[in-house]
Amino acid sequence: MKTLTNRFALLLAAAAVVPLLAYGAVSVLSLRAGAQQAVIVGNLNVARQISEQIELYVTGSINILKAVAADLQQTGLQQWQQDRILKNFVIQFAEFKELTLINDEGTPFVSSRLGTPTVSVPGSEGIDFNGVLISPFYVDDDLLPTATIAVRLADREGGWLVGRLNLEAMWRMVDRIRVGENGFALVVTSDGRLLAHGNPTAKSRVARGDNLQQHPLVARMGNMPTETEVTSAQYENEQGATLGVAARLPSLEWTVIVEQPESEAFAIPIRLQRQLGIAIAVALMVMLGVGYVWGRRFIGPILALTRGTRALADGRLTERVTVDSTDEIGELGLAFNNMADRLVELQEDVRKKERQAMFGRISVGLVHDLSHPIQNIGNSCKLIVKMFDDIEYRESFKRTIERELAQVKRVLDDLRNVARPIPLQKFPIDVNKALSDLVESMQTTAESAGLTIEMEFVLGHLYVEGDLFALNRVYRNLLMNAMQATPPRGRVVVRTTRHDAWASIQIADTGCGIPNERLGSIFEDFVTTKRRGLGLGLAISKKIVEQLDGIITVESQVGIGSTFTLRFPLTQARPSRLAIVESA
């Protein structure tokens, strides 16, 4: 349940912490975005520098080959002199593993290689780079990136100077590049071939000639205009979430990629974000704690008033609240205590009046119910003194005394049964038979009152677990009430039905009926619609029915009549004699 204390604490948190949360969220987002952009820009600069160095390296190597070609053109050197020049250049420049002169027919005639030359003029697959043919790069036997470069000799003999360029220095340069602890660079050719990789564990991919055409950055570069030199992306690879940047080498159409795990690249903003989140959480918890303590002190008197109100609602009128404050809540606590004191006085006054009213009703009922029998007994006692010798009167006196004493006993039994329920003994009883016997015994009384009693019983037997004496008392009481409420020439109907596992008994009359406002209280003690009596008959009947696990209800309309309905659960048990006969 949401208490005022919790609401007050939340209100304080909303007033003090929500702006802090908003500012923190904006700060975190701005800091993270700015830091990520700074990391991306820094990595892009690294990739751009690598691409420039590689392009300078390749361009320088090509220029060296051009210089060699220039030394060999228009000089009229002998082959042994040309051979000496080629060997000297190969020794001096480690980038070239082999230099060979090839005529226009494709036949090598001078080479720095001692054995058979291994290079040839690139065919249609080669690209023209500043007047130089360059073959696609491949991995040689030493697992190093290699390409064949051919320079046209512009002399009268023609031919080509062909060199095998080894990019070992470029590979070493890529190996030396580190971005953080786990950031590496890699070089990819225009056709997607992996040419160099700075990650030692990925060197085997270069040897295998892996194709990275589907790499996110390579694919993006391929779909972007050629004037776009750099791009970046975040993607998943074998290292997990990765930040990658790429720079294009326009002259060679290569792509230099720098990859770094996001956890390392964005470590600073992530750490700052975590620290700021912890600070906000701590501030929120502190504010909630302060708000809760303050709220408890502020709302404590209200909670005390709530407890006191509930105590009064539960009937504990001695409950009082202690409020130390002198503000409006203190005045409310004082008013509550005064109200409780006044309620005690009013309750005691109501109890006195209720006792007086109950005693009055009991007294009036006893006077009505006992005055006539006592008067009859008194008159009979006076006459018996004078007519004791009259044998016939003595018999009449005896019958009168027994009848009136039985009436007195019945009134006293009703009073006793209100305070203590009648102990009942349950036996299987046939409802139809019990009602038939009772109605037959009351036919004379009904005829004397000018009434008709009709019986509408369901076919067969209706056996319930009950006390025959107690049930007959209930039936007799309901029948007497029906006959007393019905004018002459009226009728009373006793009806039994069977509904599933229940036996239903209805006693209906065509009497005056009961007003709706009194239907809800007719089963209460000392409530009656008659001019005489204690009003205990229906109350005792209801208690007997409920002791037998039954239900009693009433429906009535003024001027039409009333119907009392009794419902009892059916039983499979049978009276012992009947059970013996059925088993025989």
Image: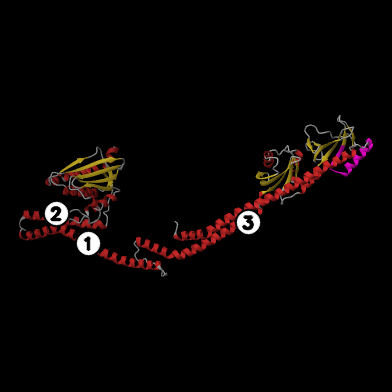
534 or 208, nearer to the observer = 208
How many numbered badges does the structure rendering display?
3
571 or 578, nearer to the observer = 571
State the residue at coordinates (92%, 37%): 75
Q: Is residue 484 in the magenta section? A: no
Where does the N terminus fall, quadrant-wise?
bottom left
Q: Earlier in the sequence, mark 3 or mark 1?
A: 3
Q: Which residue is mark 3?
A: 272
Q: Residue 361 placed where, x, y %?
A: 20, 59
Mark 3 or 2: the one toward you: 3
Q: Earlier in the sequence, mark 2 or mark 1?
A: 1
Q: Secondary structure at mark 2?
A: helix
Q: Which residue is mark 1?
A: 357
Q: Quadrant of residue 574?
A: top left
Q: Quadrant of residue 570?
A: top left
Main SS class of the magenta portion in the image: helix
- Neighbor class of circle 1 (other Cα within 10 Å; few <14, some 14-19, many 20+) is few
Q: Are marks 2 and 1 in contact (CB under 8 Å)?
A: no
Q: Residue 472 placed where, x, y %?
A: 22, 48
Q: CA distance from mark 3 to mark 2?
A: 103 Å
